[in-house]
Every structure is written in C-alpha cells, then in structure tokens.
Image (tube, helix red, strand yellow):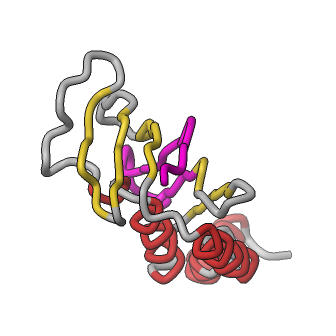
Amino acid sequence: MIPRTLRLRLAALAAVLALPLAIAACANSPSGPDEQDRVALLDALQRWEAQGARSYTFMVGPRCYCGVQEMRITVVDGVPTSRVYVRDGSPVPAALFHTLDTVDAMLAHVGSAISDNVAKLDATYDERGVPVEVFIDYSENAIDEEFGWVVTSLTITP
C-alpha cells in the first residue's frame, strides 16, 4: 500500500505534467477560421466582383464595445464620399471605422482576420457577396477587443 502523502505528491506531479499538454491542446483548437471560411470569402469576393458595383449607398452598424451608432456610407467610383450617422446626420469622424468604408474594405478585413488566424470568426454574406453580418474575436483571452458589423441595407447606384 502507498502512503497517503506519496499518493498526494504523485497526483500533484501528474497534474503538473498534464497541464502543458492541456494548454497545448487548447492552443491548437480549431475554433478559429478554417477552410470553410476561406472558401466562403473567395465565393463572396467573386460574387461582389461580378456585380461590378462601384457606386452604392449602404447602412452599417459597427458591433463593438465602443457605443457607435449606425452609419450611412455613400461610395462613388469605389471611393467613400459621405459617412454620416443615421440618427442625426452628423459626420462620422475621419479616423473611425475605415474597415467599413466600402464593401471591398469589409471583405479585405475578413480576409485579414482569416490570415491572422483570429480566435473566432463568424461571417455571413448575402447573394451579392456583401459581408452583411460579421463577428471577429481577435484573442480568446482578451476582453472587449471583439469587433464586427451588420449591414442593414445596400443600394447600388448607376
């Protein structure tokens, strides 16, 4: 029979030795972007390019812990020409949310999230390839660094 103190020490040693294995298993968890995310993005890029849309207006609401309200963005010939808050029509500060300025910028942001192997990515695209709902968790162990958006409307203009 093994003495109680020796059993406790062996159990503690086993736990200490198992901890790095458990951490390594979690670090290689397949919860980040996968091949499906890459394929969905490529499909969305092809559908958006097939639209040939260079001018459009859309409404988008950032999803973050920053308290930002929905914005209306007008794009002419691929360049954002107007960025205003929907609620009161005031201009969105120039330094904010450039990843939401155009559909191309939003698609590129999703592509960067995939390349950076973020902790979690959920992206939904409409039939035109517009990323209409996106959630990105950059680091599973950080708080309030998540970002995303919801596109509530997009009208292509001639």
Residue 39 is a magenta residue: no
Place residue 91 in its image quadrant.
Answer: top left
Q: Is residue 116 visible?
A: yes
Give the residue displayed 49% in from the left and 59% down from the top: 140
- At a point 57% along the width and 77% down the height, the residue shown is 27
Among the 4 quarters of the image, the one containing residue 15: bottom right
Q: Is residue 144 above or below residue 28?
A: above
Quadrant for the N terminus in the image? bottom right
Please give the range of residues in magenta. 134-158
How far across and down, in percent of the image, does residue 48 sit?
Answer: 60, 69
Residue at x 24%, y 50% (from the top left corner): 81
> Horizontal placement of 89 versus 106: left or right?
left
- Eyeballing the image, is 96 above or below 65? below
Q: Residue furthest right?
A: 1
Q: Extreme top residue here?
A: 88
| Nearer to me, 53 or 90 | 53
Query: In the displayed image of the protein, which residue is found farthest to the left?
Result: 94
Q: Position of residue 130 (x, y in %)?
A: 60, 58
**Where residue 64 sits in the image (x, y, percent)?**
39, 40
